[in-house]
Amino acid sequence: MDADQTTSKEAEASIDLLVIVLDTNPSQHIVRQNPQNLTQILEAVIAFGNAHLMQKAQNKLAVLSCSHHATNFLYPQPRRPVELRQVDGQYEAFSLVEKTVKQQLGSILMNAPRLSSPCESLLAGSMSMALCYISRLQRNVPPGVKMHSRILVLTGSNECASQYMTYMNVFFTAQKLDIVIDTCALDKTLSLLQQGCDITSGQFLKVTQLDGLLQYLLWVFLPAPQMRNKLVLPPPPKVDYRASCFCHRELIDIGYVCSVCLSVFCKYSPICTTCHTIFKSPGPLPVKGKKKKKTDKQM
Amino acid sequence: MAEDEHEDQKEYRWETGYEKTWEAIKDDEDGLLDGAIAEIIQKAKRQRLAQKAKQNRLGMMRHLFIVLDCSESMSVPDLKPTRLRCTVKLLEVFIEEFFDQNPISQLGIIALKAKRAEKVTDLTGTSRVHLKALESLANVSLTSEPSLQNGLDLALKTLKVVPPHASREIVVIIGSLTTCDPVDINLTIDELKKEGIRCSVISLSAEIRVARYLTQQTMGTFGAVLDDAHFRDQLMSQVDPPPAAKTQHNSLIRMGFPHTKSEVEGKDAPLSMCMCHIENLEEPSELSTTGHHCPQCNSKYCELPVECQSCGLTLVSAPHLARSYHHLFPVPNFEELPFESMPASAGSSDQDRDGGIRDCYACAKALGPVADKSVFKCSFCKQFFCTDCDIFIHETLHACVGCNTIPGVDGLVYQQTTKPGEDDAHPGSSKQRVQFGI
């Protein structure tokens, strides 16, 4: 009896927060292929979110949509309560999630500017917004209560190197705050998000069959990170942490790093193209007679 | 000298900060103090942010020695429980933070015991060694006086041979008001100045003339602590990389980016031992298939960053380098505005929103005129943020949420920060963002 009470108290004293970042960009390959896919993804996400809420009364959920023009909160929406009536005996909180998410997404898609050409989803930005939201809830947690947070990213987009810095900042912030980042790739393998999952010890999964999305979600992403090591989950992918040089964008094994701005180059050059620093000591440069004269003149 | 006095006079301006503090607290119409108190808290939070100076070129590769006083004066219980224990506790936090923010830097600890200087840990890039050493330092017997000169000399001897592209620093934490030196300390100070080693001093008791002179000569900072919170702030300000010294040589450093070998010719990688633990008797190295292999000599390491023991190549992974980019491309400070100036529809695309409700763009917190007297606006994306998000974005996240979620704004930020002539370190940043490939 006592043991029961303590475990239940422990469970009560911890909150699991799940923030789902859903890519709703219409230029995703899978959406363009078949617009019905988005509906299917949405249904799966709602069911998954409800499954998370069902596990414990203290669990919390937030859903963000990352569209081509903006990032918005789909749930919760404390400002605009949806009219609720019990349907088919479903628990009100679950139908609230479903109604709010659908209504919000509907109004966002209706108001969105028309897309002339495919554009990238700013997923890194949406994740940074999720982090701000998590850190706000974290600040307001009553003393004695623990909150475990995680972010699940569902996307079918490609990732873009231009967001590299934001991604990295997001990953390191998440690592610092003990937030796990999970990624469910719907279309392509995403090496940046793979790194993020590895840094924050989250799960990365590339879904091969969209029909079984809910099944995948419930299997891989529903269990809390603390109990995942007891389960049989897909093995972690091999993450390539090699750097790419700034000059040719090729993955390199050995390179030269500027001591001022830490840019990576594959060959020695007397001036840094990023910060325009002139390097004084041409130490490792294989100097031949003619070459040396040239560099001397430049200096 | 005249300059000195001028600065000293300025010093006591802090006292004015305590004038009429009761007048700052005014109750609102309902007779409540909440609003006024919230404002004071907000101001204090903002102060540290504003103090962060903008720097162009930073000494990103730091070689830092912590010189810690272990003399009798460290047993004084004015910092709880004693000066030494308080310092050790704070240093633990500092070391973690230091390596988190300066991933390819090195740190060493020197203890000043009974007029002698003793190197506790050599310059290394892993926090584990230092934390272990600190644990044992907490229990040393505290006797006699310290010798500042001996400590500086020992640090100087080691830092002299460090490659010239690195930024070399010494942070002295001293509790004693006196120092017992073998010869004239000015000789050491001149030598430090000549070598371009930046010395900072944190005094746990009071301002010491020779320590202040040392910091002035070597471009460091001096601080005397008021209490443990102030001590913590002083120590944490050393975490951010300092501006690059003039004497620092810029150069390209050869580095290796190891990759994990999981398969060799279609088979699983053979079992091997890592080089980092091979000579460590307490934690012998284990046979395993995973690890990072030096691309030059193929020796294996279980942790990065590390300097290869057999060929001397610095081994890092790309995210390690990325970890310190935020120092070079900081988020520009937000503009502080009164709550009233925030348009009601800001932060949301909803049109049917009723008038008086305003949300923080990043965390969707409902802002009210009482709790949030001032809001913060990013001058690039024109979004409004609450105080907490402002601090979170600048101190932890290092990326503006608005600029990164609204397409089109993103590139703009980096173009605008690169006004010609304003700062040198930035011209390539927008280009750099594009160039970062994987």
Image (tube, rainbow, N blue to C red):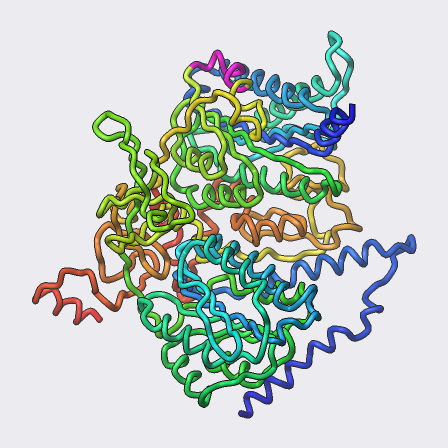
Using the rendered image of the protein, determine whether residue B243 is visible from the camera's viewpoint. Answer: yes
**Residue sitting at 56 percent across and 50 percent down?**
B396
Q: Is residue A247 left or right of residue A65?
A: left
Q: Is residue B387 above or below residue B6?
A: above
Nearest to the observer: residue B286 or residue B328:
B286
Q: Tell which residue pokes out farthest to the left in this image.
A: A289
Magenta span dominant secondary structure:
helix
Q: Is residue B3 magenta?
A: no
Where residue A219 sits: x, y (%)?
Answer: 53, 18
- Residue at image position (78%, 49%) is B369
The x, y position of residue B79, in whole percent, is 68, 67
The residue depicted at 73 percent of the width and 52 percent of the height is B339
Give the residue at the far top of this rendering.
Answer: A88
Number of disc labels = 0
Magenta span covers which residues? Answer: A209-217
Residue occupying image coordinates x 65% and y 20%:
A50
Q: Residue B360 versus residue B159: which sits nearer the camera? A: B159
Frontmost residue, A247 versus B172: B172
